[in-house]
Image (cartoon, helix red, strand yellow):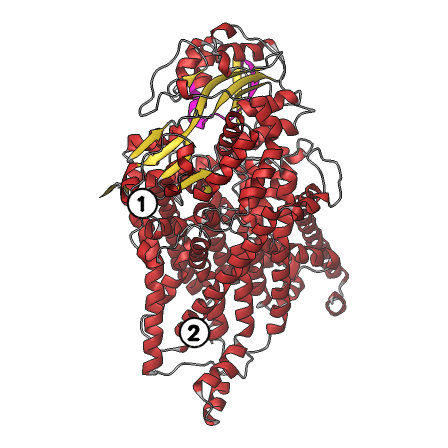
Amino acid sequence: MDTSINRKLATPNYLQRLSLSFSRDSALLGGILIILTVLMGFFILAPMLTMFAKSVQDLNGNFIGLSNFTAYFQSSAMLHSIANTVTVGLITTAIVGVLSFSYAYALTRSCMPFKTLFQIVGSAPILAPSLLPAISLIYLFGNQGIAKELLGGASIYGVIGITIGMAFWTFPHALMILTTALRTSDARLYEAATVLKTHPIKTFFMVTLPAAKYGVISTLILVFTLVVCDFGVPKVIGGSYNVLATDIFKQVVGQQNFAMGAVTSVLLLLPAVLAFMIDRHVQRKQQNLFDSRSVAYTPKPHKVRDGICLLFCSTIALAILAVIGMAIYASFVTFWPWNLSLSFNNYNFSEVSTYGWTPYFNSLTLASWVAVFGTVIIFIGAYVIEKGRGFGPIRQLLQMITIIPMAVPGIVLGLGYIFFFNDVNNPLNGLYATMILLVINTVVHYYTVGHMTALTALKQLPAEIEAISASIKMPQYKSFFVITLPICAPAIMDIAAYLFINALTTTSAVVFLYATDTIPASVSVLNMDDAGQTGSAAAMAVMILVTAALAKVIHLIAASFINKRTQAWRQK
Amino acid sequence: MKQRWMIGSIAALSALFTAPVFAAEAVVVYTAFETDVLAKYKVAFEKENPDIDIKWVRDSTGIMTAKLLAEKNNPRAEVVWGLAGSSMALLKNAGILKPYSPKGVENLRTSMIDPEENKAWYGNDAWFNAICFNEYVAKQHNLPKPTSWDDLLKPIYKGHIAMPNPASSGTGYMQVSAWLQTMGEDKGWSYMTKLNENIAHYTHSGSKPCVQAGMGEVAIGVSMALRGAKLKTQGAPLDVILPDGGIGWESEAVGLVKPSAAAKRVIDWSISKQANELYNESYALVGHKDVSKAVTNYPNVQDAMVAMDFGKMADDRKAVLHTWSEKFDSKSEAK
């Protein structure tokens, strides 16, 4: 590709300088690629491989083949956990699938009022740690709960509690995918249906559903994976209902049986990887449903439909607000359920926990580092993979590795990190139990989504930018800073906000990795709940929620400001 | 606020690059003590021993035990101080703890030190399991107050009892061991099988059953007495009951890993009267015979303590947990 340019501008002096700048560019590029490969090798591949190795070793580290797995499958308790995990996964997926589809349908295909409000309320649970709904549900439906009659005598502890808690927590994830899927619909199909006098219900099944098919499949898979991998909700409200995620905790923390913990992790990895592969397959097919000739569908008012939609969305929104509201109320109740007077006592963390406010500031530190460091590495990584010249095999390899974190449940990733970094013979052992390792772990945990966002933004840029900048003797790093970075500013902010919020709320990956001076707020919620400081646990969860919401608001304000400065060219 | 987290991050970063500077001889001590007491013990020790610097490595009991076992061939700890007695027995069997008889050992309660030959560990404090009984919930459901372990088998308590899952929690395993050791294997297992009928749910944490009793989520929690006393002080309508048949207990103990003069001095101090007075601030029962100050709302446990064989507890652990899981862990949801 360079030869044609070279031939046209063939003064020797110029050629020399051009080749010089190319070699400098490729040296820089090669350097970054090598660093990236090494980092990913250490922080993604090695921990996972160590975990696989552990699952085929005995407690003393001798290779024993698959006998751990044999022992596992001979245990009725373990098999029971697998059945439980699948059951609760399927029930929650079915419920969230139906509810979030209807909600997204109402948001995109009706003319009901207050759509923005419903959009915000529907997405709010994403800002909360997964323990927040679990604590709320105990206050709502527990044996002293204010609404326990609604359960008709059934206990909230167990499959009911896990299902409701996980449904609350996964709803916004499902909603996000489904609104996107339903929004990009071709109005011409609906015109055709109207002309053919097709019954609206038939139209729904013949047009609406097929168009959103891939979104629906993605949603179902995502919800199932999230439910199966979460361990906070089942730990707090699962009662005796054992699932794989709590089994891992039991084996590692309760019995120090790392080999069995690894076996359970490998098993937990299977459904996640399978689901992920189906999803990739489906995504590949999804393209080109909506092309330049399509006309975006805009709903027309329809009294009955809009009324039903409004009623439905109000119900769901109220349920979400009730759960969040209950957690906020719980954080102010002095001593539930014996002293219901309201006070700030629960926020006085130094009274109830040896850590005081430290976990909150640890989480802020963690989230800030994850957002800054993660965004930089993810964006540069995506850039060299997408826009680099040469080094094809390395770039392809990296592209494949970046997909792995999405398929790995947080608790499994955390365990892999213990195995790998807690080894005395590992020179990186010094990282163990430091904030740095927490930051790295969290960046890796959320790498894939950030990478995809960066990639999408980069793909929108014409490839000629690099060629042109090369022809005007501009080094690639300069064109990166002057052109690429400002244009991709919105995507970069999205990545930073995504990383920040998730670093605040994550529990499962970091629960094995923190040390006394690096304990994050989400883990302290778990600890205070264990120690009977439920009000303070709720208070800390509310602090996380408020901070995440604040971060989101700042993100939206900053985004609108930056969009005005850098994205004017998008307006036609 | 902003400054604080920035300082935190800078500190975290610099911790990697700067090696700590020791003015005095450092002794690496592995511990599972709560974090808030660590500074207190360190300051008190170093005041009297300015030439020795304690370097704490702290984690939960389970993780600390696993860590010590993993480092068996190349131990980094010199002293273990504040780890469960059953873990100490396990470490002694594995040859990690070295026999040592500290100065002042004659002042310690014999029930709390290593019962075997070549004594290697000495209990600093002890904690207990009891029945946390919510009087308010009991009145709602007309439940009489249980006074013995056998009372808990009565059908009236069905669905009102929580206890820790021994596979998740050391407190739970201690309780199971106490039943097996006091009742005998056969009776113990048949007791648990009957009790299982009345259990509402097993929890993953040792203090959670008392917490749930405190919140009124269950009427009865078999769990750490200390947690029950604390919740009662906070205002929960709890009664902390020491049932007939005796209560199980576990100590937090000290022992030697890498012999050196400095390490031995740490152990000597850890069983001194001064140290025990510090333990007594949070624990009702401590190792030293002459130190015993009451803790608020804490029952008088000394007479109810059963004899515990920590060596056996450590040896049987895997087998007991396996049997327990097969019997009760696959229990379906409470019907």
Q: Nearer the viewer, residue A381 or A247?
A: A247
Neighbor class of circle 1 (other Cα within 10 Å; few <14, some 14-19, many 20+) is many
At 36% across and 42% down in the image, what residue appears?
Answer: B156
Asked whether residue A3 is drawn in magenta, I would say: no
Q: Which residue is mark 2?
A: A105
Whether residue B68 sits left or right of residue B218 in the image: it is: right
Q: Nearer the viewer, residue A465 or A76?
A: A76
Q: Chain of mark 2?
A: A
Q: Marks 2 and 1, Cα distance to the nearest angstrom?
A: 34 Å
Q: Secondary structure at mark 2?
A: helix
- Tell me if B194 is positioned left or right of A124 in this view: right
Residue A372 numbered tag: none
Q: Which residue is mark 1?
A: A331
**Residue at 57 percent of width and 65 percent of height:** A456
Tally the marks.
Answer: 2
The chain letter under disc 1 is A
User: Can you say whether A259 is above or below B37 in the image?
Assistant: below
Please tell me whether residue B33 belongs to the stretch shown in magenta. yes
As drawn, A435 above or below A302: above
Earlier sequence position, callout 2 versus callout 1? 2
What residue is at 42 percent from the left and 19 percent from the top? B40
Q: B75 and A251: which one is in front?
A: A251
**SS assignment at label 1:** helix
Q: Which region of the structure is painted magenta?
A: B23-40
